Image (cartoon, rainbow, N blue to C red):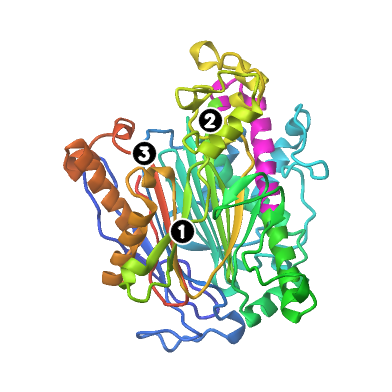
Amino acid sequence: MEGDGVSNYGLRATIMLGETMVKPEGELKVSFGYQCNSNRGSFCEDSDEYEIPPEFRRNSSFSCLSGAALSANATLANTNICNGLIGAEILPSWDSPNSFRRVPSSPSMSRLDILSSSFQSSISNLSCSPSTPDSDSYLMKSTSPSRNDSFLSGMEVQVAGGAAGEDRVQAVCSEENGWLFCAIYDGFNGRDAADFLAGTLYETIIFHFNSLDWESSQESIKASNDLDIDESLPYIGDHSTISGERFSSGIYAHKDSSFDNTSKNTPCAKVKTLTDSFRHGVLDSLQQALSQAENDFLCMVDQEMVDRPDLVSVGCCVLVALLHGKDLYTLNLGDSRAVLATYGDGYLMSGSDRLKAIQLTDSHTVDDESERMRVLCEHPDDPMTVVAGKVKGKLKVTRAFGVGYLKKKKLNDALMGILQVRNLISPPYVSTQPALNVHRISKSDCFVVLGSDGLFDFFTNDEAVKLVHSYILSNPSGDPAKFLLEQLVVRAANSAGLSMEELMNIPAGRRRKYHDDVTVIVIMLGTDQRTTKASTCV
């Protein structure tokens, strides 16, 4: 099958049909892949007749990615939120579950404009306050600068992703401009929140990125790369823990202790200051975009809950990874994870033993002692804050997008009977404050595994990293994300005393008893050329 992803700059794309994983009756388990081969301007194998001009040669820190998703929950195929615009007009322009495809990065009418034209009057009449004092809803018309002149520029981007049960996965890439955006939206109590994010969050992030000082940041990033500044700068919006250290609100913390007052006037120190300022702006933009999306989603729920009261309980965990140059930014809300595979310093150990798994994200659940204590301290007058290991007896995650009934009394009142939360004394009980981090990619870093919590129900961080590492050593052109899902199905089947075929023959919905919806993205770091694939199993 031919794809439409051939660049004007000689970037040749090949669409490859993947092997079937399992073929039970009524289950589609075929995946397609997208393979892009480019290395310093020339192509390997039989493609040396193609040449990428110098201005379009790779300047990124990733070589490929692999994505896969497996459903367990039964959910509606289409959403009717926002009068059906999300499902009918916006998501079809994003969804590409079987391959990457090229789309214009600046369409004549953006997805946000579509919503704006339909919902501007109705949203503005709702009793919803903006997420920030100086920002209007993204549903209002934007007068932001052209995307081609700002952060994450590019005339075209490549997109892939789709839905599996209540999960959604999304990837947006501009290889010639050196950036990659990946997101996993792990929905619960329905897929509407995940659909809303898949249809709007990327555009909302772009909107906020347009306010960054892009021209000056390019100079600082180039200087930073030339000086090879290698460090991670955690940024947390509240009192949270990253890498074993605690930081106060809105503060960067340098892991490089040599950066002190005596070196502030050196060229390296000045570059660090400029680079840190830009990174701070990127993380601020990510947080503001998420807050904007949350505000708009709850406004939409408020508007539509008369016809669909179930929307007040719909929510989503969020994991976003943005790789730009050598900087890997992560935002997470809930229990999805980003795990970095990097080589340690044990030179006497074998390659696989030297590979360490470092979790770049926090786990926001009541099982985490710091999160549990935070929730309890925020509600000192409510003795029923955590009941049976869940927030208000309803939800295991302590931070999530949506779930308005645990955040606003009005939305909780829309529910009837046992669905309603009793004694909602001091909402909100679930936070929308994300954990944010930026990691500086080094030569020791190998790959990153992004996964919804369903993956880590069966694998530890170390196990996931070792499985991917062993697989890519023996299958350099294979699909490590799909391989992880195959291994998960094997474990789930063994745990249930079933064969893989027996497990996968169980209809979606009933199969949730044995495993969750699972979404995985594997990002290969460095410049070694490998297969780039995206697949969704539904």
Residue type, numbered disc 2 = Val
Residue type, numbered disc 1 = Ile
The residue stretch that appears in magenta: 284-312
Residue type, numbered disc 3 = Asp
Residue identifier under label 2: 314
Q: Earlier in the sequence, mark 3 or mark 1?
A: 1
| Residues tagged 2 and 3 counted as in contact (Cβ below 8 A) | no
Identify the image quadrant of residue 19: bottom left
Instruction: Identify the disc placed on residue 358.
Output: 1
Quadrant for the N terminus in the image:
bottom left
Q: Position of residue 129 (x, y in %)?
A: 77, 33
Indicate which label's residue lies in the foreground, 2 or 3.
3
The dominant secondary structure in magenta is helix
Residue identifier under label 3: 516
Indicate which label's residue lies in the foreground, 2 or 1.
1
How many numbered marks have been drawn onto this rendered protein structure? 3
Q: Is residue 280 left or right of residue 474?
A: right
Q: Position of residue 260 (x, y in %)?
A: 73, 70
Q: Earlier in the sequence, mark 2 or mark 1?
A: 2
Indicate which label's residue lies in the foreground, 3 or 1.
1
Residue 430 seen in this snapshot: no
Alpha carbon distance from label 2 to label 1: 31 Å
Alpha carbon distance from label 3 to label 1: 24 Å
Q: Which of these two is toward me, 368 or 478?
A: 368
Tell me what residue is drawn at x 59 percent, y 39 percent.
Answer: 85
